[in-house]
Amino acid sequence: MATKRLFFLSFLITSLSFGAFSQEIITAERYLETVSEKYANMRDFEAKISIQASGSTMTGTISYLVPYFLRIDFTTPAEQVVVFNGDMLTLFLPDYRATLTQEVSSGRSSADGQGLRILRRNYTPSYVTGPAPVLLEGTSESVVKLRLTRRSSSESFREIIVSVNPDTKLIRRMDGTTLTGALVRFDFSAIKINQGIPEQRFIYDSPATANMYHNFLFKDTD
């Protein structure tokens, strides 16, 4: 009888061990791919955004519509707006009563619905502590943290830490470290996807009293 019990116990341990090790090991590269697939299948995106850099914080609401429409309506600084419609980048700075615009050629504004393709191409992913969710600093939320390390010296960020909600596969926070060691943090909260955002949201009429500055970044000759 003792021999039978020992055999059964050994069989049970072996079976459980085999089942545990036979489960798929999700690599950081594969995890980033699943997040990319999530974003690639979005039609629109809206969230509260907080941007911290150089000791200051900007807050507002970000809206995105496939394939390239983007708008941020800031609450801090109040009334500041950034809009991109694929052909024109517009920035309204209320403190200076100035509207800055930049024409962009159609070649630059094309999008292919590949989600986080640029990050996956230009950065090498790894887990910060492992695939298990950890607490997101300053919150009660749990996230999976990926460390993205640049593949070439041409990238502006030496490293990016991407914090992903493990249930929704949506990015909750991005911490970018510049070449000089400065930290830029993007926080996304109250995220809503596929809400039917219309293109009209990305039409911006600058205040009549604002001074206009065209092609403030470069002169587009393409």
Image (cartoon, rainbow, N blue to C red):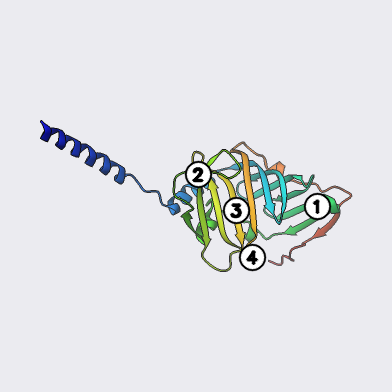
Residue 21 in picture, x, y percent from top left: 30, 46
**Disc with the residue nearer the chain's start (4 vs 3):** 3
Residue beneath disc 2: 134
Residue beneath disc 3: 175
The quadrant of the image that shows the C terminus is bottom right
Q: Secondary structure at mark 4?
A: loop
In three-dimensional space, the C-alpha distance between marks 2 and 1, rounded to whole angstroms, equals 38 Å
Q: Which residue is depicted at the point 67% across and 40% down?
A: 198
In three-dimensional space, the C-alpha distance between marks 4 and 3, rounded to whole angstroms, equals 14 Å
Q: Secondary structure at mark 2?
A: strand
Residue beneath disc 4: 180
**Disc with the residue nearer the chain's start (4 vs 1):** 1
Under mark 2, the amino acid is Val
**Disc with the residue nearer the chain's start (2 vs 3):** 2
Q: Which residue is depicted at the point 50% across and 52% down?
A: 146
**Relative to the observer, which residue lies in front, 61 or 71?**
61
Q: Does the CB distance between marks 2 and 4 fall below 8 Å?
A: no
Q: Does the CB distance between marks 4 and 1 fall below 8 Å?
A: no
Residue 168 in picture, x, y percent from top left: 51, 39
Under mark 3, the amino acid is Asp
Residue lying furthest top in this view? 1
Residue beneath disc 1: 93
Instruction: Give the vertical position of 37 relative to 12 (above or below).
Output: below
**Disc with the residue nearer the chain's start (2 vs 4):** 2
In three-dimensional space, the C-alpha distance between marks 1 and 3, rounded to whole angstroms, equals 25 Å
Q: Which residue is depicted at the point 68% across and 43% down?
A: 199
